[in-house]
Amino acid sequence: MGNVSRFVRALKLLTKSGPLFTIAATTAVLASGQGPIGLLGALLGLILQLAALQIGTLTGALIWRLRIRHIIIGVGRELRAWNTPNLRIVLRSLPVVIMVGARSIHSPVRKRLWLTGATSVLAAILTATTTWLLATGELSRGLAIGATTCLLHELIPRRSAGTTSPGWFLFSLPRLSGRPAAEMDATPLVNNVVDAIRTADLDTADTALAKLVEAHPALLMTTGAQATMLNIRGKYAEALQLLSALVGRPDMEPRDMALILAEMAGATASAVEAGQLPLEIGLSAGTRAADSAIGFGLPRYRLTGTLAQLALLRGDTTEALSLARQSADSSTDALARADSLATAARAQMAAGDNSAARTTLAEAESLAAWLPRVTTTSARLKID
């Protein structure tokens, strides 16, 4: 009972600190009686279970016909990447975790997502059960504690701007209704727009967007897709105006607000950069939007690309370059990496290092030479 009580207290105290920190801290509490070897085993069990959940997601996505959009192996600096229009596989410098991203392209969306979540949980249950069956010493008992703690935490239904737990898919998704359910059901149409953008086929993207607007004119996802198309065409001020109109809607949850404010911050920074918005107005507005997005629950690392642009607008080239590199290395999307590399190249140019900027921009062009911020950065570099 003592371990159970400590587990409950740890969850209550640490849940707001972030999922991984919560799991790690709670695992340490439970494994503390096993000694240093047990703590090491608990850490390994945590890593093992996180991998099992992701492999379960990958398996479920393949079985239930979701599209795999990225497979990220490790954390830290990007070492190697393999890109196709629909899939990005990345190997990072510290290969201790795996992250799988999937999206729905077929109906019924919610049923497929629920089945994928259930497959992920089943893989985690099998992993935890196996660790207990093989537990014979301090290391293996610690392994079982770590795997089980991770499983129990991931079964807690939670959904925020930063993460969605398998437990949310398993227990909360079936009860989803109203606009949130409609948003989820519309994702195949949204993904038609995204797929066309990824291949730089903007005419097809416009056609897909028109179908989305006709079918679901009032959804947040529809407005988000419209704003994305405007951004892709370099019409940042128009995208900002479109997004700003959503802020007063009464039906938005904190997660919705965080994501919209993040898009607004990015559009604002790009609008100032492109001369579509005055610096004295846009810099403060973009900073407020970014801070508010973080306040509504968006992890700061998800905003590093925008924060890099804002730092560059403030004239802080060192901070801008650091944040842009972080954003590029944490990106799960080739277009997002190209955009962050464009920011890094601009920071290097501002610091007077055009040679480094050319090297950085060369990679951005290899990923998406047609992106407006990549093309304008290239033009500026040629002039310099």
Image (tube, rainbow, N blue to C red):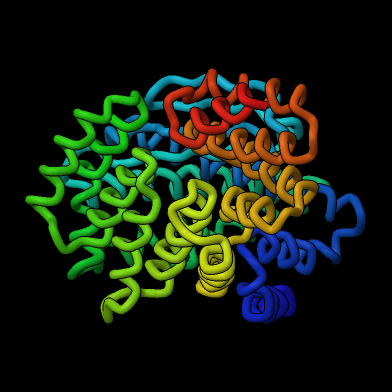
Can residue 62 be seen? yes
Taking the spot 32% from the left edge, 55% from the top edge, the residue there is 238
342 left or right of 237 in image? right
Q: Quadrant of residue 75?
A: top right
Q: Is residue 112 above or below residue 66?
A: below
Quarter of the image with the C terminus is top right
49 left or right of 216 in image? right
Q: In front here: 130 or 76?
A: 76
Q: Picture coordinates of residue 7 (x, y %)?
A: 68, 73
How many numbered markers are drawn?
0
Q: In front here: 5 or 101?
A: 101
77 left or right of 343 in image? right
Taking the spot 59% from the left edge, 48% from the top edge, the residue there is 305
Quarter of the image with the N terminus is bottom right
Q: Quadrant of residue 370?
A: top left
Q: In front here: 223 or 236?
A: 236
Q: Is residue 82 above or below residue 228?
A: above
Q: Picture coordinates of residue 288 (x, y %)?
A: 55, 72
Q: Is residue 281 above or below residue 380?
A: below
Can residue 114 be seen? no
Taking the spot 52% from the left edge, 68% from the top edge, the residue there is 281
Q: Quadrant of residue 253?
A: bottom left
Q: Picture coordinates of residue 156 (x, y %)?
A: 49, 67
Taking the spot 41% from the left edge, 70% from the top edge, the residue there is 257
Q: Is residue 79 above or below residue 209?
A: above
Q: Which residue reaches farthest right?
A: 36
